[in-house]
Amino acid sequence: MTLEDRGPGPDAVYREELLAGRFTIQTCADCGLASFPPRVFCRHCGSDALTRVEASGHGVVYSTSAVRNRPDKGGDHNVSLVDLAEGVRMLTRVDGAAPTEVPIGARVKARIVTGDVPHVVFDLVTE
Ligand SMILES: [Zn+2]
């Protein structure tokens, strides 16, 4: 069996799940660890026994950078790394703070943004 026989690739499946309102990550049936971004083989042990599970959506800001941009190109925003509760680190955006003031270590919660390319951003957890 070739990889092409397996149906849609992991990225396509991830986007389909987002469109259906589910933020999923992969976990490995062999080593039990989580992988992200979507991939064919486990990033820890190389197994192809990856299954999709719905992520809790809970995370913590690991690092952040402010990106300055023209207003017609989306304006200033942040690019942040968020550590998910499941043990994977995700390149994303954190909403709810100015681009230069995203607090490192803050708790965040995932939110799915649908559109041309569905993706996940995070909101600061304030309470
Ligand atoms: Zn594994």
Image (cartoon, rainbow, N blue to C red):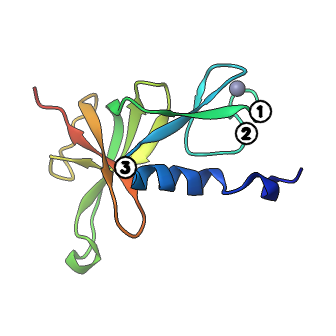
Q: Residue furthest bottom?
A: 72
Q: What element carries label 2?
A: loop
Q: Name the residue under label 1.
A: 46
Few, some or many residues within 10 Å of mark 2 (<14, 14–19, 20+) = some
Camera-side residue of 50 and 126: 50
Which circle marks residue 41 in the picture? 2
Callout count: 3
Q: Name the residue under label 3.
A: 120
Res 102 → quadrant: top left
Residues marked 3 and 2 touching at CB (< 8 Å)? no
Q: Residue at x 23, y 64 (%)?
A: 76
Q: Where is residue 3 in the image (x, y as percent from the top left)?
A: 81, 53
Side of 76 where 113 appears, left or right:
right
In the picture, which quadrant includes the C terminus?
A: top left
Q: Residue furthest top?
A: 31
Q: Where is residue 104 in the image (x, y as percent from the top left)?
A: 27, 33
